[in-house]
Amino acid sequence: MARSSLPLLLLSLLASTSLPAMEINAPAPPDHWQESDWKGLPDSTQVDKQRVLFAKHDSDSYLGLAILLPDWQRSGQLWQLTRDLGRLGFDTLLLLPSPQQAELDPAAEKKQKTMDAFRQQFAERIVKLSDAKLQEGGFKLLLAQGTSAAWAANLIASEQLPAPDALVLLDGFFPNQLSNQTLAKQVAQASIPTLDLYQEEGGRWPLLAAEARKSESRRSHKLNYRPYALMALDETPGRIQGWLTHLGWI
């Protein structure tokens, strides 16, 4: 009797141990924790079912909408500019970045389908969210950082993203020299006014990319292009204000 019950006992044990494996949840998407971190903040809101950070201007007059595109895991760094931009008259809209923007490279032909899907999604997000928040008569300022800056300039050059009234690049780069050379030509050939900021103590790729853009823009005699090396990141608001004054916005 004991012998015949042993196989049944083993089967029941196997069934009980295999059950938890079936109940394991799928892993969270890479940007899940990023969205969770920002969800409880006062400036956090949802637009078109997407988590964004949005702040109204606190000046007497409305100047426009500043669209902030941070680099992956740098959202807090770029959001620090909100107060200064608000004083100038800008509403500020920050789109949370995607980890894909730091992983994909325009020169990588093997990932073309993945890259095309990312480019389309990134451009559509910027257009939909900015259209939802831009008030009539205001300027559209696009301020992008790191790989977001590189992708934004790339999308504008390919006309997948409508050009804003002005573009600010902050440490813009791709982690590939060929892609950075292509980006430099795209920035130089674009008619959009561009402020190209980069940190003197920045990483290797941002510095190489900034130098390529400066050289190409000089060669192309690009108008309304101003490169500037920052000693510290907190110089950024002052440089933006001076540049907008030069453009006649302020």
Image (cartoon, grey):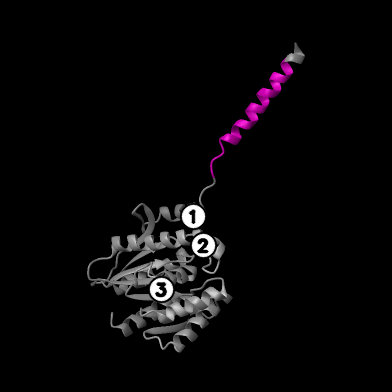
Q: Is residue 42 above or below residue 234?
A: above
Q: Earlier in the sequence, mark 2 or mark 3?
A: 2
2 vs 3, front mark: 2
Q: Tell me how far mark 3 sits from mark 1, CA to CA.
A: 27 Å
Residue for badge 3: 157
Crowding near pointer 1: few (<14 within 10 Å), some, many (20+)? some
Crowding near pointer 2: few (<14 within 10 Å), some, many (20+)? some
Residue for badge 2: 112
3 vs 1, front mark: 3
Badge 2 element: helix
Assess whether residue 24 is covered by the magenta stretch.
Answer: yes
Type of the residue with mark 1: Asp
Residue for badge 1: 31
Assess whether residue 138 is covered by the magenta stretch.
Answer: no
The one nearer the camera, 164 or 228, is 164
Badge 1 element: loop
Q: Can residue 203 be seen in the rendering of this structure?
A: no
